[in-house]
Image (tube, rainbow, N blue to C red):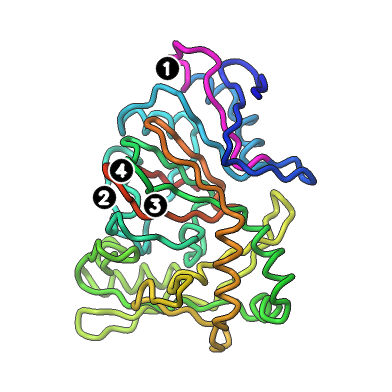
Amino acid sequence: MEMATGRLFQEIQLPEQKSYDDDGIIFPLVLSPNTAQVKLCAFKEAIRDHKPWLESLLQKNGAILFRGFPVVSPSDFNDVVEAFGFPESLYVGGRASRTKVIGRIYTANECSPDMRIPFHHEMTYVPDCPSKLFFFCEEEPGSGGETPIVLSHIIYDKMKETHPDFVSRLEEHGVTYIMMMSNDDHPSSFTGSSWKSAYMTDDKKVAQQRAAKLGTKLEWTGNAVKTITGPLPAIRFDKGSERKTWFNNLTGPVNGEDKIYDKDIFIELGNGEAVPDEAMRDCLRILEEECVSIPWKNGDIMLVNNLMVLHSRMPLLKPPRRILASLCK
């Protein structure tokens, strides 16, 4: 079924989408051109002309997938991001290895493509995290390599139902993120950024100052550093949707089989209490049950409300895959 939504844009449906009838949410919303011969300049103009409408759709649904538009290169993608006019959010303090491609465009996480990246909100560990994320598929995967997304308020609601005591402690105490960072980037890890890359300096004193501005304490051991961030809120009230969200990266260090995803990350409650394994197992199960995973196609752009939606990455089963990203305030 297709629904007309105005000039140039039409809403289409994909089998992977979820609909939440009580709230009228379609997740994600998918928009395509209503003409076969659309040009990039017309797409950019339509974004500028319909920006308030597109923002209202993003606020309601949490994510928009733009499919079938003539976006081919990183430069095209940069032009589309610029057309939206959102201020850029710099990746200072970021934990993943990324490389600038052009303008406001960076590689997505550069860790080994056969690794699963756990569900997370981007940069929950800094005070002013990005509110919006753009992803662009320059080369679609042969197989695998999807970017699953999930509505954060659904995870909060289901976790509160399943583990009410733990969630109330989480709301009371928040979480503390503890991480080891080395002198050099380690792209094999999904949090493989060195302290030099994360704080954009070779100078330990400057790194210390930049970390402090982000609420992070650095403890040096030679050229390696332990970063301690928090306590930070683990549950966030999203004013736009008027819902509580599961705004944390608690499932980052472990996966469903209790294997360590990343030995360099440790997360505890803000009062120093350990996070119960059973709660994390249930959280991982709920995330998998509730997420939407749409296979990438060349030219896809996905706009994500980072305050409402967690995202992840599936292992690449068959290359190639090239997904680029841009972070916005």
To which quarter of the image does residue 160 belong? Answer: bottom right
**Disc ID at residue 41:** 1
To which quarter of the image does residue 116 belong? Answer: bottom left
Q: Residue at x 65, y 29 (%)?
A: 53
Across and down, in percent, residue 135 comes to 42, 42
Residue 309 within the segment the image draws in magenta: no
Magenta segment: 26-43
- Report, in whole angstroms, how far the alpha carbon at label 1 lies from the one at label 2: 27 Å
The crowd level at tag 3 (other Cα within 10 Å; few <14, some 14-19, many 20+) is: some
Q: Which of marks 1 and 3 is in front?
A: 1
Amino acid at dot 4: Arg
Which of the two labelled residues, at mark 2 and mark 3, occupies the earlier sequence position?
3
The crowd level at tag 4 (other Cα within 10 Å; few <14, some 14-19, many 20+) is: many
Q: Nearer the viewer, mark 2 or mark 4?
A: 4
Q: Report the residue marked by disc 4.
A: 321
- Report, in whole angstroms, how far the alpha carbon at label 2 lies from the one at label 3: 13 Å
